[in-house]
Image (tube, grey):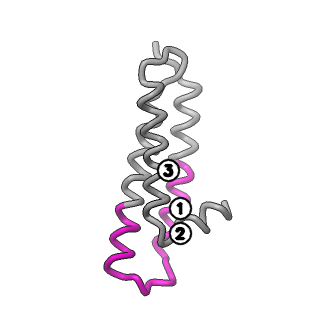
Amino acid sequence: MDTITNLYPQNPLAILVIALIFFAFYWLLRNSASVNARGLLLPAIAWLVAAAWELVIRLFSPEANIRVDLLLILPLLLILTVWGIVRALWWRRA
């Protein structure tokens, strides 16, 4: 968790890279019979929205050094990421 909290604030490009990694895994695994790749879409979209939000904060409020929004965003991203990976690996297509 410490790595995520050091990576996340004020770095929208790194967050975008994480979103693109999820989109790439979705794209590569979308036709796989053993993996439900649709589970990876939710974390990818969540990280993409987080990157956009962080870019907005960086552009319009660069002096914000106390970020209360991160108390909601970081746990939500963590939950959605874990849920998406678990869903992709455990819930197989019928």
Secondary structure beneath label 3: helix
Do tag 3 and tag 2 residues touch (Cβ < 8 Å)? no
Can you give x and y, in whole percent of width and height, for residue 32 in the image? 48, 18
Mark closer to the observer (3, 2) = 3
Q: Residue at x 56, y 37 (%)?
A: 85
Q: Residue at x 44, y 32 (%)?
A: 26
The CA span between labels 1 and 2 is 6 Å
Q: Which residue is mark 3?
A: 18
Type of amino acid under label 1: Leu
The CA span between labels 1 and 3 is 14 Å
Q: Which residue is mark 2?
A: 71
Do tag 1 and tag 2 residues touch (Cβ < 8 Å)? yes
Range of residues picked out in magenta? 52-79
Q: Residue at x 48, y 34 (%)?
A: 25
Mark closer to the observer (1, 3) = 3
Type of amino acid under label 2: Leu
Secondary structure beneath label 2: helix
Q: Which mark is residue 11?
A: none
Q: Residues within 10 Å of mark 2 (few under 14, many from 20)?
A: few
Q: Residue at x 48, y 67 (%)?
A: 11
81 up-or-down from 6: above or below: above
15 up-or-down from 60: above or below: above
Q: Earlier in the sequence, mark 1 or mark 3?
A: 3
Do tag 1 and tag 3 residues touch (Cβ < 8 Å)? no
Type of amino acid under label 3: Ile
Can you give x and y, in whole percent of width and height, for residue 86 in the image? 58, 34
- Please state if 2 lies on the left or on the right of 82 as rendered: right
Q: Which mark is residue 74?
A: 1
8 up-or-down from 92: above or below: below
Query: Dividing the image into 4 quarters, which one contains the N terminus?
Result: bottom right
